[in-house]
Image (cartoon, helix red, strand yellow):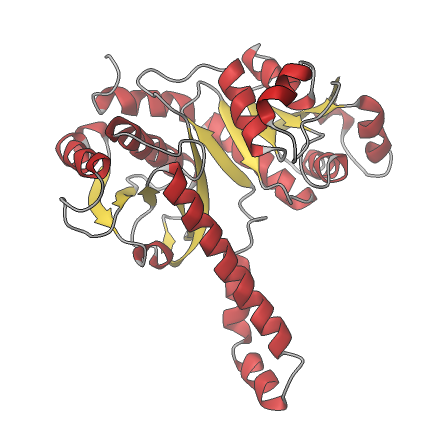
Amino acid sequence: MVTVALDAMGGDDGVEATVRGAALLSTEPSDVSVLLVGEVAEVNRVLSQVSYDPSRITLVDSRGVVGMADKPGPALDRMNDCSILTAARLVAEGQADALVSAGHTGATVLASARTFQRLPGIRRAALAAVYPTEKRHGPKRDPFALMLDVGATLDASKDDLVAFAVMGAAYSAVISEIPTPRVALLSNGSEPNKGTAAIVEAHAHLAARGASAGLTFVGNVEGLDIPRGTVDVVVCDGFLGNVVLKMLEGVSEVARDVAHKASGRKLQWRMGLAMLGGGLKQLRRMTDWKVYGGAPLLGMDQVVIKAHGRSEARAVRNAVKVAAKAVRGDLVRRTADGMRSAGLAEE
């Protein structure tokens, strides 16, 4: 049985979404149990409204929650027993195998940094995110690829970028089940000498040592390659990654809004949309972040999944399932092995 500590208070919808997500998962055949960490009275209120398997849900009391408008550092200092810190401690103490939260991203990252250890050779953790692509990936034919970092490390050095490549490849291999993920650096040109000094140096290192670390490094990609899905893992610093991710989310939302507005206008528009119906449904499936659950915080000695703040029950359930899959796939050990093989950690 894989046990996941779920921050029951985190997210835009708080306990309504997290508790219902855990309850939904508990009624499905799986080897996953959930520690629901939050204010027990609130958690019980929602549990009383849904069906669930009590043998697979355990309540753990906590006091306080980091709000979306709070500054994470002062909030965590002020609330030592808040839901995200309590959940992280349960994982560090071995009572749970992974941490999941839909709450404040900064608080999740900081609580993990304060509670867990970074793996040898990893200077900074990375927040990864999947994004929709035209090309399908791996044996599961996923319409998603992975990009990191998307916000945890704004300014990345050469060693950081190489570490991100190792971490991203390990995660893609475990979650997307791609035996040899194709990894690339995001730059302003495909040539090895294009990009910042850190990108150029990381390119040279990955070209020389990538194969020995089990990486299929294919060089640089440009922005236009991202939605095409030419690679499985795109590596960049957190500033650039966050900008790109928000742009991709915005484009997909605009496409859906345009289609919705057009459906109520002229007959010709409605006929055209009807003919494009299959493609629009595929677009909605590809850009539905609820399907993949959440973004991993990579580089720690524990599995951490940050679910989207707007997660509802289905998305929470999927985030917990992704966390459990990462535990079963021994993601932490595979990342540590990759760091040693890449020459960034001692053998």
Q: Quadrant of residue 61?
A: top right
Q: Is residue 27 above or below residue 139?
A: above
Q: Position of residue 111 (x, y in %)?
A: 56, 20
Q: Nearer the viewer, residue 174 or 65?
A: 65
Image quadrant holding the C terminus, namely: top left
> What is the x, y in percent for residue 333?
38, 20
> In the rendered image, is residue 89 in sight?
yes
Residue at far top of view: 93
Q: In the image, 37: left or right of 147?
A: right
Residue 204, given in percent of the width and then of the height, sits at 14, 35
Examine the rendered structure and indicate whether residue 149 appears above or below residue 304.
below
Numbered label tally: 0
Q: Quadrant of residue 177?
A: top left
Q: 287 or 105: nearer the eye?
A: 105
Measuring from the top left, give residue 274's x and y in whole percent: 58, 80
**The N terminus: image quadrant:** top right
Left or right: 28 as drawn, with respect to 301: right
Residue 148 seen in the current view: no
Residue 231 horizontal side relative to residue 201, left or right = right
Considering depth in this image, is 168 or 327 the residue closer to the camera?
A: 168
The residue under the point 23% across, 34% down is 198
Q: Is residue 94 above or below residue 149?
A: above
Q: Write the residue at 33% across / 46% down.
A: 232
Left or right of 165? Residue 94 is: right
